[in-house]
Amino acid sequence: MQINTSNHTQPTSIKHATIKKKTRRSLLYLILILFAIVNGYPILWMVMNSFKSSQEFSLNPFGLPMEWVFTNFQEAWVTANIGTFFFNSVFVGLVSVVIAILTGALASFFLARFQFKGKALLYGFLVLGLLIPIHSTLVPMYILMQNIGLLNTYWSLIFPYVAFNLPITIFLLTSFMRSLPSEIEESAIMDGAGVFRIFWSIILPMTKPAIATAVVINFINNWNEFAFALVLISDESMQTLPLGLANFAGAYTTNYPAQMAGLTTVLIPTIIFYLIMEKQIVDGMTQGAVKG
């Protein structure tokens, strides 16, 4: 007499698979939580100490403030001239992002949706910019800006920012535009739409998730950039936040809470900008993964 054990083994295997899946998920969550703590604690420590007095910071640098000192932000803003640095960074960063995104989107449109001789070579040449280290171009860039009279101007930063952000922008947008179905353009052509009409009214809106990702990358790169600002800008009224904060740290090394307040002020726009664009970034990543 043969006993059928398939009904007993099947639920057991399913149970083991479920336990294994839950274990993997729990382990993944644990790793992500640890990663968030490791990356988030320095930010929390900085914000926490920005509300302390100098004496309390020296006595208790790792505890919560006993007395919340809000004047540190006012002192950092006024004494270190953060208002001017803040405006310079915002202006240079946003103008560079707009130029890089519009130029990169137009170039990506022709690279992704048109067939012409040398397309692969041109695309490789543009993306090759990802491999060029910024520091190797500082001296040639200084000589170039000096010869054309753009030193100590906004354009001396805008042009390099656009140039070094174009490769990653073209890489992201070209990859996304290639995945769009060609039937959309064919229908638009039959309705009498021209090339630029198709780009502006059809392709560009459909590429919003990838554009959002490129915008965030461009903005963060511009916001945190230090080398070009150090070499190309010597006029204090034209300096950006990273360079201004470096001077602030050197001149006021005894007032650490004020430095923390200045750094917190610089960090807030980046966090707000990322939170605003979060949905578009996630959509861009998920859509890119699905279209593969």
Image (cartoon, rainbow, N blue to C red):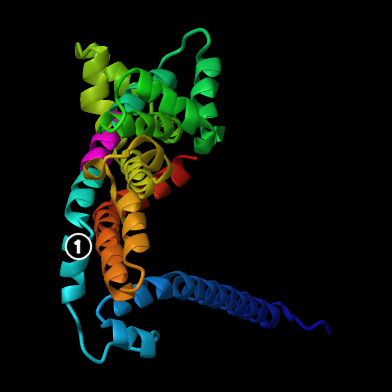
**Residue at horizontal 18 percent and vertical 47 percent from the top:** 87
Judge by depth and name the residue closer to the eye, 205 or 220: 220
Return the residue found at the far top: 117
**Direction from residue 289 to residue 106 in the image, left or right:** left
Return the residue found at the far right: 1
**182 up-or-down from 17: above or below:** above
Tell me, yes or no, whether the highlighted magenta stretch contains residue 95: yes
Q: Where is residue 46 in the image (x, y as percent from the top left)?
A: 35, 73
Q: Where is residue 133 in the image (x, y as percent from the top left)?
A: 54, 36
Q: Where is residue 191 in the image (x, y as percent from the top left)?
A: 20, 14
Looking at the magenta stretch, what is its main secondary structure?
Answer: helix
Judge by depth and name the residue closer to the eye, 95 or 255: 255
Tell me, yes or no, whether the highlighted magenta stretch contains residue 47: no
What stretch of residues is rendered in magenta?
91-100
Residue 107 shows in the view: no
Amino acid type of the residue that numbered disc 1 sits on in the rendered structure:
Thr
Residue 142 shows in the view: yes
Give residue 254's quadrant in the image. bottom left
User: What element does badge 1 sit on?
Assistant: helix
**Residue at horizontal 37 percent and vertical 90 percent from the top:** 59
Q: How crowded is mark 1: few (under 14 residues within 10 Å), some or many (20 or more)?
A: few
**Direction from residue 141 to residue 100 in the image, left or right:** left
**Direction from residue 90 to residue 126 in the image, left or right:** right
**Residue at horizontal 29 percent and vertical 75 percent from the top:** 257
**127 up-or-down from 188: above or below:** below
Task: Give the labeled residue for mark 1.
Answer: 79
Give residue 212's quadrant in the image. top left
Q: Quadrant of the N terminus?
A: bottom right
State how many labels appear: 1
Judge by depth and name the residue closer to the eye, 271 or 229: 229
**Residue at horizontal 28 percent and vertical 33 percent from the top:** 152
